[in-house]
């Protein structure tokens, strides 16, 4: 019944009985309605959910991130047990989750960094990347953004390993022209090993060394506080919503080129944050940066390795030799883009340098590292030198294989291997392999043939004799030709 209707009839002078007859209710009801407020609401009947007795425990389970399926199992084991249906339980837990989330929400406090102060860094991921003619490719987005100038740097990578992160950061520093005071990260597993009992960050040793060498302050967000790096998270969304849609890429090279073009365009457009062009603001910010001391191609990622009993270290499933006097013990390794440098345990003296291996299960051995050991094991020198020569080139491996097969006698191939190693050291890889190619073509297997060919430029000879099975030498040919000429003269004189 509308109370306004009762009051309307009453204002027209009708009695309570007349109004009751008009509206079909008792006169006492009309009288009570006139005494009560116009907007009075009657309390509805409260229905208590069967899940309500377990509310306190459910709130605790929600805080502990226990799955709903497990919650209902636990509630059915309570005393008294929950006997209701699962759907009612799920709906009730869903409401509690929303309440907990709403109660835990804080008002965001926005701030603007000072010039040169903050670089925010994060990872994104794109599955089923739109490469032409490829399926199932995943690419990770390295995103970095300066808080003050809003300069963006984006790079697409195949993984999120610590070396990838560091080299991406160095390329970002090169792009912006220096090192900011502070780099802010999420709690990445590549750079942190969690937190100690006091809540302090346990930093990855390699990343800690990198930050110390480039002199920037490293900082991570508080746990479950993604709003602390909202600027860079928005950058990941911009890449996915602005750069990616409507574009297809031939390969990673095409992706990199078009990404750089997009960065130049977006960093050259006015930013809504300060209504200025980021590139223009960057010029002011660069004066505050820490000078960059290295580059992504030059920097060597630090790693500590143990020297094994074969005087090698294990690195990325490959072996690299070190001087035998460093066993047993540990060494400091610097993993460059193409070079691996190994230092003594104090990190002051470089004791070995190798070309970096990228395929697993390979060995990079320098025979001179075993010189002290070979004094006691002379036969080991032959095997070591042979393995070293074989690893240099496939054709050289084939040449040595044929040589060892042909000279498997009493003296064996040992002297040849030792002589070949000396020639390789003396004349260099390029000339030595050229001599091997010639001898292989002429089917001449032996260190004496290689030595003869390699010494020709120093002897002043323009030609050299080689005995090739089945083919006469030039001396034999000249002798036969002389006999043939004499024969022809005799025939003519007698004719």
Image (spheres, helix red, strand yellow):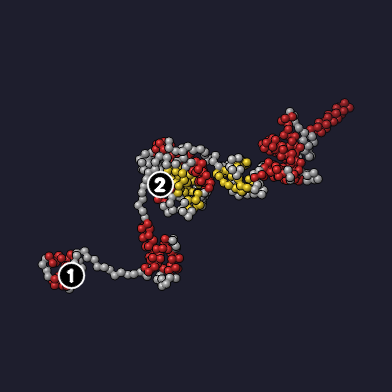
Q: Nearer the viewer, residue 452 or 106?
A: 106
Residue 307 horizontal/vertical position (percent): 63, 48
Q: Quadrant of the N terminus?
A: bottom left
Q: Mark 1 and 2 residues: CB-CB less than 8 Å, in contact?
A: no
Is residue 378 something that shows in the picture?
yes
**Residue 88 in the image: above or below residue 327:** below
Q: Residues within 10 Å of mark 2 (few under 14, many from 20)?
A: some
Residue 475 horizontal/vertical position (percent): 81, 32
Q: Residue at x 70, y 38 (%)?
A: 424
Residue denoted by label 2: 231
Say whether residue 138 is left or right of residue 478.
Answer: left
Query: For the view shown, which residue lies furthest in the front direction?
Result: 198
Q: Residue at x 70, y 43 (%)?
A: 372
Q: Nearer the viewer, residue 142 or 295?
A: 295
**Mark 1 falls on what kind of element?**
helix
Q: Quadrant of the C terminus?
A: top right
Residue 370 horizontal/vertical position (percent): 69, 43
**Mark 2 falls on what kind of element?**
helix
Is residue 267 something that shows in the picture?
no
> Spatial distance from mark 1 to mark 2, Cα to Cα?
61 Å
Q: Looking at the image, is mark 1 or mark 2 earlier in the sequence?
A: 1
Where is residue 268, by image quadrant?
A: top left
Residue denoted by label 1: 32
Query: For the view shown, which residue lies furthest in the left direction?
Result: 13
Say whether residue 113 is left or right of residue 346.
Answer: left
Q: Residue at x 12, y 65 (%)?
A: 11
Query: For the view shown, which residue lies furthest in the right direction?
Result: 494
Where is residue 53, by image quadrant?
A: bottom left
Say whether residue 303 is left or right of residue 410.
Answer: left
Query: For the view shown, which residue lies furthest in the top direction?
Result: 493
């Amino acid at each position: 019944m509308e109370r306004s209707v009762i009051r309307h009839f009453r204002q027209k002078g009708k009695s309570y009985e007349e109004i009751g007859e008009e509206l079909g209710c008792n006169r006492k009801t009309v009288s009570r309605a006139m005494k009560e407020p116009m907007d009075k609401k009657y309390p509805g009947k409260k229905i208590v959910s069967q899940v309500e007795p377990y509310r306190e425990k459910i709130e605790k389970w929600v805080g502990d991130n226990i799955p709903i399926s497990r919650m209902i199992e636990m509630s059915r084991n309570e005393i008294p047990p929950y006997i209701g249906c699962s759907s009612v339980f799920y709906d009730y837990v869903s409401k509690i989750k929303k309440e907990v989330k709403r109660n835990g929400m804080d008002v965001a406090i926005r701030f603007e960094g000072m010039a040169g102060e903050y670089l925010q860094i994060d990872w994104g991921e794109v599955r089923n990347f739109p490469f032409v003619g490829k399926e199932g490719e995943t690419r990770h987005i390295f995103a970095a953004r300066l808080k003050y100038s809003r300069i963006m740097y984006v790079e697409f990578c195949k993984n999120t390993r610590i070396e990838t992160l560091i080299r991406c950061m160095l390329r970002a520093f090169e792009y912006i022209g220096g090192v900011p005071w502070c780099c802010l990260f999420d709690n990445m597993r590549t750079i942190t090993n969690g937190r100690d009992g006091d809540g302090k960050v346990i930093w990855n040793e390699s990343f800690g060394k990198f930050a110390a060498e480039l002199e920037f302050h490293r900082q991570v967000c508080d746990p479950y506080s993604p709003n602390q790096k909202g600027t860079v998270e928005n950058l990941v969304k911009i890449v996915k919503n602005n750069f990616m849609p409507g574009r297809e890429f031939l390969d990673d090279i095409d992706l990199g080129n078009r990404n750089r073009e997009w960065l130049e365009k977006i960093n050259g457009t006015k930013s809504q944050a300060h209504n200025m062009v980021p590139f223009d603001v960057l010029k002011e910010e660069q004066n505050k940066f820490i000078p960059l001391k290295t580059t992504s191609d030059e920097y060597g990622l630090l790693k500590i390795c143990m020297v094994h009993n074969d005087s090698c270290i294990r690195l990325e499933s490959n072996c690299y030799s070190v001087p035998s006097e460093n066993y047993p013990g540990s060494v400091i390794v610097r993993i460059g883009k193409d070079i691996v440098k190994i230092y003594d345990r104090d990190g002051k003296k470089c004791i070995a340098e190798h070309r970096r291996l990228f395929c697993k299960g390979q060995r990079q051995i320098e025979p001179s590292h075993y010189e002290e050991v070979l004094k006691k094991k002379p036969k080991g020198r032959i095997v070591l030198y042979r393995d070293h020569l074989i690893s240099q080139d496939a054709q050289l491996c084939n040449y040595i294989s044929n040589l060892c097969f042909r000279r498997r006698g009493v003296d064996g191939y040992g002297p040849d291997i030792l002589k070949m190693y000396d020639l390789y050291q003396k004349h260099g890889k390029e000339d030595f392999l050229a001599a091997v190619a010639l001898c292989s073509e002429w089917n001449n297997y032996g260190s004496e043939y290689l030595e003869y060919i390699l010494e020709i430029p120093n002897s002043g000879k323009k030609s050299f004799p080689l005995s090739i099975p089945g083919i006469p030498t030039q001396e034999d040919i000249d002798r036969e030709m002389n006999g043939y000429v004499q024969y022809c003269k005799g025939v003519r004189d007698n004719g």
